[in-house]
Image: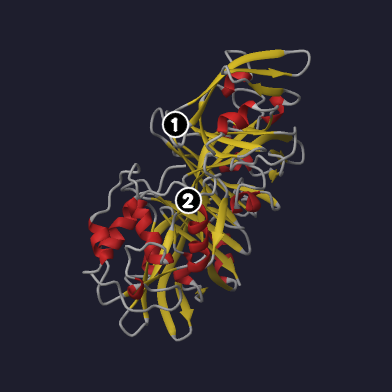
Amino acid sequence: MKKLTNLSMLLLCCLTLVFSACNRDELPTEGDPQDSINTTSPLSDLILAISQDSSSPDAIDCIDFVYPITFFVYDSNQQQTGSQTVNSDTELLQFLSGLNVNHSYSIDYPIEVILQDGSIVEVNSNSELQGLIESCESGGNQVPSNLEQILTTGSWFITYFFDDQDETSNYAGYEFSFSTDNTAQATNGSNTVNGIWSLTSGSTPDLNLFFGTTSPFDELDEDWDIIEATQDIIRLKHISGGNGDVDFLTYERNPGSGGGGGGGGGQGSGPLVDVLIDGVWYVTLLEDDGNDETCDYQPYEFTFNSNQTVVAASTNNTVNGTWAVTNDSGTFDLILNFDISGPDDPFEDLNDDWDVLAYDMQNINLIDVSGGNGGTDYLNFGRQPVTNCGGGGGGGAPLGDVLVDGQWYVQSYVDDGDDQTGLYQGYTLTFNTDGTVIAVNGSTNISGTWNVFGGANDLHLDLDFGSQFPFDEFNDDWDVSNYTDILVELFDISGGNGGTDYLTFAKL
């Protein structure tokens, strides 16, 4: 877990009233903006003193934020005038440094925070966030001073080991013992593996393990961060210096007690997992280094099981695989590993460590940037199969007929990783046969134009709303990744920075 810098501490200060460096009378609360932050207050001094040095004594090492976070902006009459979404510490610094003395600010709950053990918690108010901070700052998850005595007393079992996928079963039946002479043993009665261990110096030591080169025990040979240690459980984490992958290792007193989730998959890994294992999914986009290969997966239904297996089934074929969700300081990865039957098997293109751009109950949008040639791949899962493969519903006319048949709303809009769906809440869109489109929200009417063009495998929807906010964000030539009678899924890759936008319309 990376430490929160003073920058993140500043956010906590503003939103939870925990830190004495802030003037409590000057802070807005959620949903009830009060006086704006005074630019001459201690808070202003804290902004100027912000440091990215995570070794600062003011840093907090037991909690972190999941970005993006959205702030609401209020004028002097306490009327909301806008919002600002931040996606990183750097963007947060820019936002906080530009606070207007005549404005007030509050946070758009719920947000998510990551605790030191890797678990993700939803927070719905300032008071809830304050409670979490106070709890972790009061000494939760601290390494006990008698850790060596705990480690060397009695036996231990590996109840969780995650390295790209759940590999706990590799250590089933092995009993671990750690001796005071810094030797270690793992034995299952018929086989014994010898090793050594040591603790680094300092108030937050690491646990070094080395069991030689014999598989699978060589996987344990790391310098492990200790994220929890008690008489009954020791939870460890290792972040790779090369690619940033995170491994988790948990020892407990009893085998298979199931307490070692640790953030690396399974139902304890947060809301993304809950979404993933809920129902059937379809590949609605697979773009491999500029080549659209979506239709290779059109016949398959994907089912992600809670035991981290995944099954892709069609009428005449079944492909088995495994999956895992990891997170590193709030950035989710979805790791896929399908069985491959030959060199041209399309499922080989799905086998990767995918960065999660955005997700909800209807869509999961993924990206992978190749470490070799820098090529970028995109993978989307949706709830409906693609229909524009081999003439099965594609082409300009069918999509046009779908759009003009009824009213639509913006189910999802993600702008280069920034979820801006909330800007379109309450709007109803009507696509007319004359190529005009109107978005209505109460007394607000925003007009534009639309046009469908392209063939079955290269379908596009062109939208133009002029300069009318917020629909000017939709002015683009959108690629159609999938459409049905009730859903239209679009994406656009920026020609400038290579960012990808996702837009989904759903029928009312």
Specify the quadrant of the image occupied by residue 85: bottom left
**Could you say which is closer to the camera, residue 502 or residue 480?**
502
As displayed, is residue 219 above or below residue 453?
above
Residue type of the residue flagged with mark 2? Ile
Q: Is residue 86 visible to the viewer in this orientation of the structure?
A: yes
Q: Position of residue 104 (x, y in %)?
A: 33, 75
Q: Position of residue 446 (x, y in %)?
A: 41, 77
Under circle 2, the secondary element is strand
**Could you say which is closer to the camera, residue 28 or residue 72?**
28
Under circle 1, the secondary element is loop
Q: Position of residue 66 (x, y in %)?
A: 47, 53
- Residue beneath the point at 71% across and 52% down: 279
**Could you say which is closer to the camera, residue 6 or residue 340?**
6
As displayed, is residue 418 above or below residue 74?
above
As displayed, is residue 86 above or below residue 423?
above
Residue type of the residue flagged with mark 1? Asn
Q: Position of residue 331 (x, y in %)?
A: 48, 46
Q: Which mark is residue 3?
A: none
Q: Is residue 463 visible to the viewer in this orientation of the structure?
A: no
Specify the quadrant of the image occupied by residue 101: bottom left
Q: How many marks?
A: 2
Q: Which residue is mark 1?
A: 243
Which of discs 1 and 2 lies nearer the camera? The answer is 2
- Residue beneath the point at 62% across and 13% down: 214
Give the quadrant of the C terminus: bottom right
Q: Which residue is mark 2?
A: 63
**Could you say which is closer to the camera, residue 142 or residue 508?**
142
What is the CA distance from the residue labelled 1 to the residue labelled 2? Answer: 22 Å
Mark 1 Cα-neighbour bin, 10 Å: few <14, some 14–19, many ≥20: few
As displayed, is residue 231 above or below residue 461?
above
